[in-house]
Image (cartoon, rainbow, N blue to C red):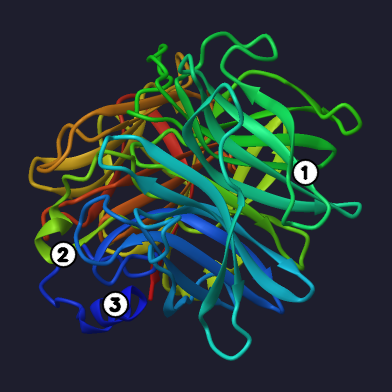
Amino acid sequence: MVDLLLEADIAASAAHCNIEDPFRLKYHITPAVGLLNDPNGFIEHKGIYHLFYQWNPFECAHGSKFWAHCISDDLVNWRLLPTAMAPDQNYDKNGCYSGSAFVNNEKLMLFYTGNVKNKDGTRLSTQCIAEANSLNDKFIKKGPVIDSPPAGYTAHFRDPKIWHDNGVWYCVIGAQTIDKKGQILLYRSTNINDWELMGPLAGSGLNELGYFGYMWECPDFFELDNNYILLCSPQGIEKEGDKYHNKYQSGYFIGSYNIQAHEFKHNEFTELDRGFEFYAPQTTTDSKGRRLMSAWMGIPEEDEQPTLAYNWLHALTLVRELKIKNGRLYQYPVEELKQLRKNQLSYQDIVVSNSQSFAQIHAPCCEIEIELNDIQGSCGVHFNAYDHYHIDLTFNPNNSKLSLDRNSTPNQSGVRSCTLLSKQSLKLHMFLDKSSIEIFVNDGEEVFTSRVFPLSEARNISIYSHGSCTITKFDKYDLS
């Protein structure tokens, strides 16, 4: 019998960093080889952060999924451990699909979806448990604890997210009704082995929400600052103005939760990220009381990227902290990222006007904080610039619209936009890596996450204005 765990570990150890690879990220989690997608099992246990991810070690394609396993004591420097799970049982032979981690009786446990695809095209989905082996970094599978979707639902039944409250275990699972409507189902258990369906928590056609997609994936349900938050990734939503332009979406509902009746009353769906590549977010709480989030820096079924030439595909976002402000979720890069800073470059109180641009700053892997005030007319930032190539982040104060434009890049195209609360000022906190950018806007009000694949020479940044604006702050740090 082939030892798939061993084969995956051999594939990872045999991979080597190609020094000619211009796109390998320097301070993000990437697969050594093969395809990465959803973050899984994000948890802090005994002072160590664990972050797993969906992984195909044998090709850059969505085949049978493994769970890769990383650990860190600071959310910045991650170490890859031996592969946690492989699709090696009859109930998960076509993939150990996404799920979560929890601690039971001091033991680290995993809760995931076992995926089976039959020759006749039918699918079987079960929710399964695995337990950490105290003698090594392996996990011992315990098998399915929810062996089928409930009546009225298809086999698209996956991605359990588990939590514990007042002696009871709960989990939410992404699901699809037989009439092709996406929903999130709520279960509970007193012993992690026997689960009772409480009913749908939210979904297409529920809670005064009209049709909203044919499948909801990757749910996460938690309380934050006396608000209840449901994260999910709906599929099948049509574009609406500047919203929902990616093939599949990820976002959240904020509302109130009646614990006795298990009823979630929520407001409208809000996208978590306004960029091109962001999906399947998952959160955890840590010993500092923070609600932390990681996500896949990619979109399902969008896998044509230049990194294929170097035999790897996709990455995870930086870890972010979530807070409630102005009735919505705000996102912040975790404080620990500051340890990467070196070689600070600063400017302040510089006026840019009449279609001028300020500076041509070389910035291949860096963190940049910019504050623009007294904005009259459109202004913005060109980054990854060289010759006529660049990525454009433009702010129009007339309608408060901020747009990220990739149409002047050699490998990608498209525009993503959102409307901000302020018209006269703009704060940007940007993290540029070799082939990614994450832009935190106005102290976390919005975030744009995108993969970018510039020419090797295209590493310059400039600030421009078609009217006038004042750069009250410009701080750049190289990131080691």
**Coordinates of residue 26 in the picture (x, y in percent):** 32, 70
- Closer to us: 410 or 314: 314
For numbered disc 2, what is the local secondary structure?
loop
For the residues labelled 3 and 2, the Cα–Cα distance comes to 27 Å
Question: Which residue is situated farthest in the bottom direction here?
Answer: 135
In this rendering, the answer to whether 188 lies above or below 360 is above
For the residues labelled 3 and 1, the Cα–Cα distance comes to 37 Å
Q: Are marks 3 and 2 in contact (CB under 8 Å)?
A: no
First of labels 3, 2 by sequence position? 3
* Nearest-to-viewer mark from 3 and 1: 3
For the residues labelled 1 and 2, the Cα–Cα distance comes to 42 Å
As drawn, the label of residue 311 is 2
* Nearest-to-viewer mark from 3 and 2: 3
Residue designated by label 1: 188
- Closer to us: 30 or 417: 30
> Please, what is the three-letter code of the amino acid marked with disc 3?
Met
> Please, what is the three-letter code of the amino acid marked with disc 1?
Arg
**Coordinates of residue 155 in the picture (x, y in percent):** 46, 34
For numbered disc 1, what is the local secondary structure?
strand
**Coordinates of residue 102 in the picture (x, y in percent):** 68, 63
> Which image quadrant: the C terminus?
bottom left
First of labels 3, 1 by sequence position? 3
Image quarter for residue 66? bottom left
User: Is residue 445 visible to us here?
Assistant: no
As drawn, the label of residue 1 is 3
**Coordinates of residue 149 in the picture (x, y in percent):** 57, 35
As drawn, the label of residue 368 is none
Instruction: Give left or right: position of 281 versus 56.
Output: right
> Which image quadrant: the N terminus?
bottom left
Instruction: Give left or right: position of 183 versus 356.
Output: right
* Nearest-to-viewer mark from 1 and 2: 1
